[in-house]
Image (cartoon, rainbow, N blue to C red):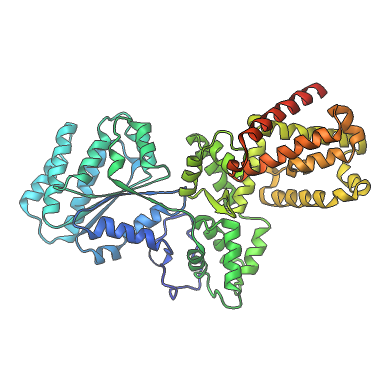
């Protein structure tokens, strides 16, 4: 946790997007304790994988715990080595770099290095060594370092890249496992990644199934209210003249407690261009009407990553429904990875703003299974009929001739305006995109003289069908499909097929 007395008069969020450490690092007390206990405090270091969505603070946490000068003061025998896996050419380069960095740290920290250790280092870094010999010489060097009482910790940042960097080198993961697991040299091995280690290894070398078994997985998710409050407390002058609880709650609503997104907002709040004392809640409300572009950039990056991983469909089904392919295990994984949260018994995206973004993405997937297609085509039918009757400004005329529909239309207008404010040109301008099955039926029932000719059946017939569609759709959306009987689920699919057939005939 940051020292709350160390505020400055400048902008403490000016370097948002870069790793955060020292006084700027807030929260994560539990994960820090796990890392210190598992990697630094025991006689045998334990391998640990830090896992979480992009920019959630994985690298910041690892840097804060292991790489700061203060960490070496607390643990005088610590020799921390940082490597970005994405920049490595293969496992032999990793081992060469490990030996070089450990040697550099030893020469900085130790007045004398015995000849045996120095000779072992020179043998480990000789050029053009065959891989098997390079591995053996590196292990011997690390064994001697450990015997002298030093603790080597290697942080392999962006370990997702291992699926590409190590793909053509069989035995790579076994070599990494050996330097962490074997008690003779036992380094503290720490990885940071978006994916779980088993997934990464399976993509690179499915035969290396034992690698992930030595790791403890440490999942990072969004900040809780206390951690978000600690982040907000870095704003100069906060909470003077403010309602701190309300300000932090509003920050949480807009960002879901995501450290990067919250810091983006607070960077704008603390911008020198604003000048004068900061009233955090007022400033957040101003920004809420047009969130910084970084929000959209982050959502798009996350969407592409999930699409590439094959997890976008699962996320959309969990938070939007219908849940046709996703399983309860998929939902639990998304929850564990911090992409979704539980709210009033239902799964939602980590923030309301990202939830709205996913609604937009879901609407644009025109191929998404039967119910999404049915819903889209019914909306198109309703819009077409009302435009023929009243023109393009049909919602205004509908309010005049059917006052009972006004509350529902107003609610849809409010949702549309919110989406357009949040997502600009990517948002939908169609009011019907914000309707539910029962809304669509009520709209058609209000002009049965027009729709009855197309639907070919009476109101009672279609009321029964749309009532069941609404009944089944809501549990699907809120991940409570277990409350829907198998008969209702089969009937739901039959009604979807019937409506599609009817719509095909109407053209």
What residue do we see at 49% from left, 50% from top?
Answer: 338
Question: With 422 as the anchor, is 393 left or right in this view?
Answer: right
In which quadrant will I find the N terminus? bottom left
Image coordinates for residue 350, horizontal then vertical, percent:
55, 51
Choose top left, top right, bottom left or bottom right for residue 505: top right
Looking at the picture, tell me which residue is in the foreground, 17 or 321: 321
Looking at the picture, tell me which residue is in the foreground, 333 or 48: 333
What residue do we see at 52% from left, 43% from top?
Answer: 302
What residue do we see at 21% from left, 47% from top?
Answer: 100
Image coordinates for residue 288, horizontal then vertical, percent:
65, 59
Residue 67 visible somewhere in the drawing: no
What residue do we see at 41% from left, 61% from top?
Answer: 28
Question: With 478 as the anchor, is 16 left or right in this view?
Answer: left
Q: Is residue 201 above or below residue 276?
A: above
Image coordinates for residue 149, horizontal then vertical, percent:
14, 58
- Residue with the most extreme top position: 505
Residue 307 visible somewhere in the drawing: yes
In which quadrant will I find the C terminus? top right
Looking at the picture, tell me which residue is in the foreground, 34 or 122: 34
């Amino acid at each position: 946790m940051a020292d709350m007395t160390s505020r400055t008069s400048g902008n403490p969020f000016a370097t948002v997007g870069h790793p955060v450490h020292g006084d700027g690092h807030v929260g994560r007390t539990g994960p820090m304790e796990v890392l210190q206990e598992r990697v630094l405090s025991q006689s045998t270091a334990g391998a640990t994988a830090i896992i979480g969505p992009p920019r959630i603070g994985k690298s910041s946490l690892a840097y804060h715990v292991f790489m700061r000068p203060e960490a070496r003061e607390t643990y005088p025998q610590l020799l921390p080595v940082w490597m970005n896996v994405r920049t490595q050419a293969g496992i032999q380069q990793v081992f060469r770099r490990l030996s070089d960095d450990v040697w550099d740290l030893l020469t900085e920290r130790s007045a004398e290095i015995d000849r045996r250790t120095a000779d072992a280092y020179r043998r480990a870094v000789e050029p053009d060594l065959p891989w098997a010999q390079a591995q053996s010489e590196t292990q011997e060097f690390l064994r001697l370092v450990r015997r002298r009482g030093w603790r080597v910790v290697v942080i392999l940042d962006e370990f997702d890249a291992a699926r590409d960097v190590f793909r053509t080198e069989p035995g790579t993961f076994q070599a990494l496992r050996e330097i962490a697991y074997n008690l003779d040299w036992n380094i503290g091995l720490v990885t940071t990644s978006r994916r779980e280690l088993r997934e990464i290894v399976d993509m690179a070398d499915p035969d290396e199934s034992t690698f992930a078994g030595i790791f403890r997985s440490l999942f990072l998710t969004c900040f809780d209210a206390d951690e978000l409050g600690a982040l907000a407390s870095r704003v100069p002058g906060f909470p003077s003249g403010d309602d701190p609880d309300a300000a932090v709650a509003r920050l949480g609503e807009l960002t879901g407690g995501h450290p990067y997104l919250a810091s983006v907002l607070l960077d704008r709040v603390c911008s020198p261009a604003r000048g004068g004392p900061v009233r955090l809640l007022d400033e957040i409300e101003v920004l809420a009407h047009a969130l910084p572009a970084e929000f959209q950039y982050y959502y798009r990056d996350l969407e592409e990553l999930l699409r590439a991983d094959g997890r976008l469909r699962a996320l959309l089904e969990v938070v939007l429904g219908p849940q046709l392919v996703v399983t309860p295990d998929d939902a639990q994984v998304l929850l564990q990875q911090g992409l979704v949260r539980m709210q009033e018994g239902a799964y939602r995206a980590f923030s309301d703003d990202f939830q709205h973004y996913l609604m937009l993405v879901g609407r644009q997937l025109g191929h998404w299974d039967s119910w999404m297609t049915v819903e889209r085509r019914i909306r198109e039918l309703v819009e077409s009929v009302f435009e023929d009757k009243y023109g393009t400004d049909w919602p205004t005329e509908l309010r005049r001739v059917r006052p009972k529909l006004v509350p529902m239309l107003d609610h849809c207008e409010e949702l549309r305006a919110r989406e357009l404010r949040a997502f600009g040109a990517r948002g939908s301008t169609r009011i019907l995109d914000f309707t539910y099955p029962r809304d669509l039926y009520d709209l058609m029932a209000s002009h049965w003289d027009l729709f009855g000719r197309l639907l070919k059946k009476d109101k009672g017939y279609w009321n029964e069908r749309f009532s069941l569609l609404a009944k089944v759709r809501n549990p699907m959306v809120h991940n409570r499909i277990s409350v829907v009987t198998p008969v209702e689920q089969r009937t739901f699919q039959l009604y979807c097929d019937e409506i599609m057939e009817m719509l095909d005939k109407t053209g």
